[in-house]
Every structure is written in structure tokens, then in C-alpha cells.
Image: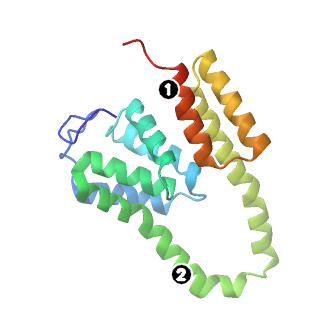
Amino acid sequence: MAGGIAEKENGAPAGSVSLPVILFTFLKIGAFTFGGGYVILPIIQREIIHRLAWLEMEDFMDILIITQSLPGPLALNCSIIVGQRLRGTAGGLVAALGIVLPSFLIILLLAAFLLPVVWDNKYVQAAFYGLRPAVAALVSAVALNLGRRFVQDRLSLGLLALLLGAALAFRLHPVFILVLGAFLGLLFCRKNE
């Protein structure tokens, strides 16, 4: 992510995207994405890279690396960084509002009115049971798609296997895996200067 705010993005010069367009785009993403986290990434990718051409894939991959390293929800972090790249601090705040507002309102309405009435309903329970594998499938699909982009040679495949094995075998905290990955990247993957 070497670009600054004044640089031209892939089809959208920074500052040329209006705040209402950013808000509407992230409201739409937030309203029509279920599952959160990694499930939302293909939707964000489709909108900001393929449909709107606000960023290039390489920039998006850099944003994903940054958002993984920050505390907080992945979709929120990603939206803030994209909004900031497009319109500075105001763009980041508007994108954050757009991604959060639909979920907040839906959860508020469900918790206040609907869930107390239908929580013990056998059809609702059956639907939740069916959603569990669907969410796992979506997360797996995102992992495979990201893996194809990130793992492109033997070294990155070896690092993936090592870090995945360490995470599963020792149940390491994700922050430790990220720090270990960064250290191994510095150790083995530096480009010749």
C-alpha cells in the first residue's frame, strides 16, 4: 500500500468518489452480507475492485493483511481503510457507518421484537442448524480464494503449511501466528535490494 490519498486508484482518483456513494456502497454491502468476517470479503472485493474499480487487487490484498493485524472486526477495519484511501478521514468514517449501520439496526430489531417470540420455534432452530455448514462453506471458499492469491510459490506454500500446522497443533493465538509469519517473511522473503 504505497499509495497516498492524492494518488489515482484504478479508475477512481482519490477524492473523486462522493461521500454519499461511499456510504451507499457500504450500506449495501453491510445490509446484504450474512455471516460477517471472511464471508463479507468477496462482496467487498466484487464491489470495490470489479464493479466500481476503486482499488486494484494488489491494494486490496495489502488492506487485508493490514486488517488482519488490527484489533476489531475485519469488515469494519477493511471498510475504514478503503474509505480513507478514497476520501481521507471523512471517507473512512462514512464507510464505517455504512458497514455497521445495517447490522446494528437488524440486530436491534431482532433482539427487541423477533427473537423473544421465535427463539424456541423448531423451524427457526432448524434454519440455524442449516446455516452453520453454509457459513463454514463460505469461510472455506474465501480461504481457498485468498490462498490462491497469497500462496504462489513453494516458499509461501511451505510457510502456509508451517504456520497452519503450528496454529492447529499448539492452538496459538492469532496474533502470535501473525507475528511469526511477519518474522519468517523478514527472514526468508526479503527482496534483493
Category of crowding for the residue at label 1, using alpha-carbon neighbours closer than 10 angstroms: few (below 14), some (14–19), many (at least 20): few
Q: Report the residue at 44% width, 43% height from top.
A: 66
Amino acid type at circle 2 is Leu
The colour style of the image is rainbow
Amino acid type at circle 1 is Leu
Q: Is residue 65 left or right of residue 151?
A: left
Indicate the quadrant where residue 166 lies: top right
Across and down, in percent, residue 70 comes to: 47, 51
Q: Report the residue at 52% width, 80% height from top.
A: 108
Q: Are marks 2 and 1 in contact (CB under 8 Å)?
A: no
Q: Is residue 25 left or right of residue 69?
A: left
Indicate the quadrant where residue 181 lies: top right
| Marker disc for residue 80 | none
Which residue bears the numbered disc 1? 186
Indicate the quadrant where residue 184 lies: top right
Which residue bears the numbered disc 2? 109
Q: Is residue 77 left or right of residue 182?
A: left
In the rendered image of this protein, does residue 28 appear above or below residue 123? above
Furthest toward the top, the residue is 192
Across and down, in percent, residue 179 comes to: 55, 40
Across and down, in percent, residue 98 comes to: 37, 63
Task: Name the secondary structure under disc 2.
Answer: helix
Q: Quadrant of the C terminus?
A: top left
